[in-house]
Amino acid sequence: MPALNRLAECVNDLEDVDCLLCGSTERQVLYRGKDRLHHVPGEFTLVECTRCGFIYLSPRPDRDEIRHFYPSDYLPFRPAIHEERSPLRRFDRLFGLYRRCRLIRQLKSRGSLLDVGCGTGDFLAVMQSYPGWTVRGLEPHAEAAAQARAQYGLSIDPVYLDDLPYQDGAFDVVTMWDVLEHLPRPRESLGRLRRVLRSDGVLVIGLPNRDSLDAKLFGQYWAGLDVPRHFSVFSVSDVTRALLEAGFDKPEIFNLNGGYHAFALSVRFLLDGARADPKLRAVILSTISSLPFRLASVPYFSLLKWLKMGSTMIIVARTACEGGKNNKHTDARVTTRNTLTGSTHD
Ligand SMILES: [Zn+2]
């Protein structure tokens, strides 16, 4: 119980923050909820900025305390892929990595790549196997960083994004898979990443999509909220605005998949929240994790992906040229060019 008591202390030690995008102090409470994933004690509050509409966690754990909310079984710190016992799970993880790597190699044929929040390094390990790529990771979780080094021989810097140790223009590509929503100052962090990218660099981000169908269907049970680890809930227009302000061109936004895993997790949270009968809960969860359900649901998730309504959105943002020469669009509408979308179908 000491660990749980420690977490309970952390929950009492939260800090109030202003809007992470516009700095306004004006906000309204949107929803109070519990940690549905790791069951950290306490209640956490998502607020909506009344000036710009951004949704963020306030109050929230500070930098010293937040590490207590990332247990060793947190998803990105999972065991190696070859140690996964379930063949389906092993296939899922490998296929997910393949899709990410294929996307990067469509954007650049070779170059230097930094993966921010690389966890145990699975993605970097695959990328470094392709000729012409030099890769590096940033991972503040010491155990995950050590595993990435030991398992794959990767170069990992165990620091936070605020302490980025690289020279300006050091990388061709920066990736952030499921990281932006965890950052305490996303606007400043995007500016920092802009500086370490070359003038023709690309930033690739994967993060929960507040505009997704799952977010609308599941509401407070949507897995993309994940309080208190997620500090922000980005919509397409939120992330576009933040990138433009940080010095990127208007991004391309699409889906790599329809979001089956987030859907399954949201169903679990909904059943838990509704205090469903344990037998019914077990039947539903085993049904949606079965191979027949997975196969039968392929058309549905493919449609979500095509509509860009999946739970996780992928952002491709290129560095804007000086004087805005590269910035062909002057408004804040989102580029929906289909070149990437069309070429990344499963
Ligand atoms: Zn705001």
Image: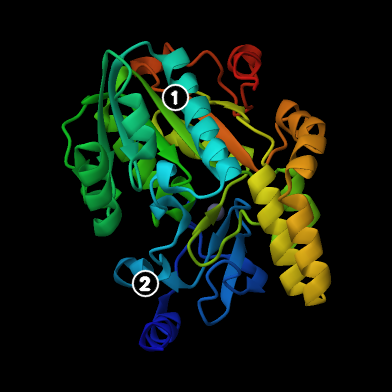
Q: Quadrant of the N terminus?
A: bottom left
Count of numbered badges drawn on the protein: 2
Residue found 30% across the figure and 39% down from its top: 192
Examine the rendered structure and indicate whether residue 106 appears above or below residue 126: above
In the displayed structure image, the side of residue 274 where residue 130 appears, left or right: left
Residue closest to the eye, 162 or 187 = 162
Q: Residues within 10 Å of mark 1 (few under 14, many from 20)?
A: some
Instruction: Look at the numbered disc 1 and give the secondary structure of its residue.
Output: helix
Q: Name the residue that disc number 2 marks.
A: 68
- The image quadrant where one finds ligand 1 is bottom right
Q: Would you place residue 246 above or below residue 36 in this image?
A: above
Front one among 104 and 64 = 104
Quadrant in the picture for the C terminus:
top right
Which residue type carries mark 1? Cys
Left-right relation of 341 to 158: right
How is the model colour-coded? rainbow
Discs 1/2, front: 1
Residue that mark 1 sits on:
101
Judged from the image, the secondary structure of the residue bearing numbered disc 2 is helix
Q: Is residue 210 visible?
A: no
